[in-house]
Amino acid sequence: MNEIQTNSKNIKEGDIFIGISCENLKRNVAEAIKNGATLVFVEAKNKNLFKNFGEKLIFIEDSRLISSKLSRFLRSSQPEFCVSVTGTNGKSSIANFVNQIWSLLGEKSANLGTLGLFIGRQKIENCGFNIQNLTTPEPVTLHKILEYLHNEKVSHFVFEASSHALDQKRLHSVKLTAAAFSNIAADHLDYHKTKEDYLTAKLKLFHEILPNDNYAIIYGDSDIILNSIKILHKKTITFGLKDANDIQAFNIMEHTNQLSFDLKFFGKIFKNLTLNLVGEFQILNVLCAMGLCYSCGANIENIAKILIKIDALNGRMEHILGFNGGEVFVDYAHTAEGMKTALLCFRQICKSRLICVFGCGGDRDKSKRMEMGRIADEFADIIIVTDDNPRSEDPATIRKEIVKNCKKTIEISDRKEAIARGMKCLESGDFLIVFGKGHETTQIYANKITSHNDKEAIMKIGREERI
């Protein structure tokens, strides 16, 4: 046996093919056999399609679960401590903060998610195989990564768990030390169809993957999360702003580029802790990260000492430059809830007007477009609606759907021009927030992918306007 494959085009002589149920399943299986697959797994519900396909076929109940289990069988090594975080917003920041805390405490740690694979602060571009451009990779790739990290002597690993990945059982064979649930809001309803389906997918991390005697770190201010997990999972650590939480932040003070707060950690009080981050919600992300690190044996006194050294994640509430007496930020928020959270945080520290630039992606959940327009209309003073990965949809149609609930709108399709207009609007005390892309470096129109980086565009405009 060479490899496990779920793409029939990648089959080489001796590989095992796992046929994921789809309309092209019969054709995919035929191609896999032709290319030299030794064994082919397909779900028993499709048995009638394969009456004359020979002895190579094995009929199973769940092809995605088999993919996960066989990937683990082929590569069983992983770091000693593996933790995962799910939630609508904050996954990338939490995972990044966990990695930073571990590294600052002297552990060799790694982080996998939306921004890629990192060992400490170093992004791993070449590890001998292709790392898929997904928040949570397919099982074969995920277990290759786990084996690679084990061989690199990484002892601590944190990764993001997307709702798609949980629904598709991509991480069902990873041995987890702990897992976290950051928050819940409507997202990816193009895939999950209902909010209930979306929540059910998220909860699989705790009900199907995390052992019941390992810690679940959960956002205790959310009754939905708290009740959904405590029903079946007894060993929990709660975090939030309410007194009942095991980990609680209080006496929070927001400044332009910093946060300060007091911390209660299982009854122990730490006074006047400082973070070089923007936005109250970042404190919740840090509390969640602290819970995950604590669940893997980190000492709370040591964690508290190094919090001042934590940096903001690339493209998350990130300050880029000052311009015309105002400040310019980028933020990855691409849901109504994420956008509202960010705007409310900026409203607390902004001395004058809030200006925002944003769009919505094509071929994705359309229900959030009008809601994001409404949120912008309610909480921002100047709104510029632009394009954000229209993909196969007409960009003008997407913008039209956004502005239905957004009266005070400037509509500019070209994203660089939209950012430039926003910066020209800045006056003393104003904040400009460019939403949606954060760390991303491309713009997708139909089948064309062009280079675009919000941060680089902001800095270039800043340089040109000052010349």
Image (spheres, grey):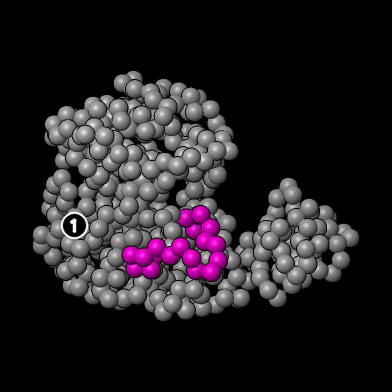
Q: Which residues are magenta?
A: 118-137
Q: What residue is disc 1 on?
A: 275
Name the residue type under label 1: Leu
- Where is residue 448 shown, x and y percent of the image? 55, 38
Q: Compared to 223, does 425 lie above or below?
A: above
- Where is residue 286 shown, x and y percent of the image? 26, 59
- Where is residue 186 shown, x and y percent of the image? 43, 42
Q: Is residue 313 left or right of residue 185?
A: left
Q: Residue at x 72, y 59 (%)?
A: 8
Q: Residue at x 41, y 55 (%)?
A: 115
| Residue 165 magenta-highlighted | no
Q: Nearer the viewer, residue 223 or 57?
A: 57
Q: Is the C terminus in the top left, top right, bottom left or bottom right quadrant?
A: top left
Is residue 221 something one can see in this rendering? Answer: yes
Q: Residue at x 52, y 41 (%)?
A: 449
Counting labels gives 1
Residue, far left: 271
Considering the whole magenta stretch, tell me its main secondary structure: loop
Q: Is the N terminus in the top left, top right, bottom left or bottom right quadrant?
A: bottom right
Of helix, strand and loop, which one carries label 1?
strand
